[in-house]
Image (cartoon, rainbow, N blue to C red):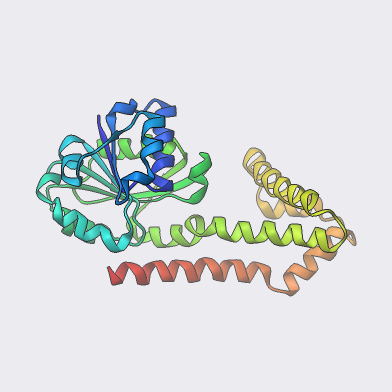
Amino acid sequence: MTFGFLGFGKMASALAQGMLQAGVCKSEQILVINRHPETIKNEVQQYGLVLAASTRRLVQQTDTIVLGTKPADSVQLLRDVRQDLEGKLLISVAAGITLEALQDAAGHRTRVIRAMPNAPSLVKQGATAYSLGDHATAGDAEVADKLFSAVGLVFRVREAALNAVTGLSGSGPAYVFIFVEALADGGVMMGLPREVALELAIQTVLGSAQMIRETRIHPAELREMVASPGGTTMAGIETLEARGLRYTIMSAVRSASERARELGRDR
């Protein structure tokens, strides 16, 4: 099977590297194209990928096309190669473009999958959710599973859930980055060197997440395990609850999800 990447930014590059390392395909089976080909020349050479002569040639020469262009450019790009997409599998990682819009642009003989990966895919710790279009097959789902499992966890969901996925795991890394930054700043405020504070904050978040995953104990129970009555942790939790951290995070997920829904309607 051959893969073609329409647009080769950071996410597409992470997917291609993950596929190669996982043995999904060989380097010569990956064709790429980018609006500014000079920006990806070194990467193409480093991994032995094939730089396509044109968008149309890329689509013609591959079985599965991964759409990673900017959302504003994606629909027209698909329309331009509509005839060449017939019988192909199109996997879109372009944010906010619905299956209906993708299918309309690519044609009804194209099998379509819409996916929402997230930034940690760049370090192979991603979380991706995807939805199948009406013409996509079980075999197509297996292709998506192989592709995205090369960079993290994969979940198949109904399309209506993708807006919530966007608000949670799509935007979630930014929330975590803010939390880690604030946690480190708190340590600096209390006298720690910045380098030490940041490393402590990073490891605290990493270790806590790993603890949830490995123990499979609910986060609320784990919180109770480390919060002794009348202790330091309870004093900190009181401040978090009083300032509405829990509600703020839930509201952020809702706001991002609603914005994703709005963007989908605008396409």
In this orientation, which residue lies closer to the viewer: 84 or 157? 84
In x, y percent, where is residue 174? Answer: 56, 59
Q: Is residue 23 above or below residue 111?
A: above
Q: Is residue 111 above or below residue 79?
A: above
In x, y percent, where is residue 244? Answer: 68, 73
Single out the residue that lies furthest toward the front: 38
In this orientation, which residue lies closer to the viewer: 261 or 234? 261
Asked if one can make out residue 168 in the rendered structure from this viewpoint, the answer is yes
**What is the number of callouts on the image?**
0
Residue at x 64%, y 38% (from the top left corner): 214
| Figure quadrant of the C terminus | bottom left
Does 237 sit left or right of 156 as displayed?
right
Asked if one can make out residue 88 in the rendered structure from this viewpoint, the answer is no
In this orientation, which residue lies closer to the viewer: 44 or 131? 44
| Figure quadrant of the N terminus | top left
In x, y percent, where is residue 65? Answer: 25, 42
Does 158 sit left or right of 164 as displayed?
left
Single out the residue that lies furthest toward the right: 230
In this orientation, which residue lies closer to the viewer: 141 or 61? 61
Quadrant assignment, res 158:
bottom left
Residue at x 72%, y 45% (from the top left corner): 203
Residue at x 51%, y 39% (from the top left corner): 124
In x, y percent, where is residue 215? Answer: 67, 40
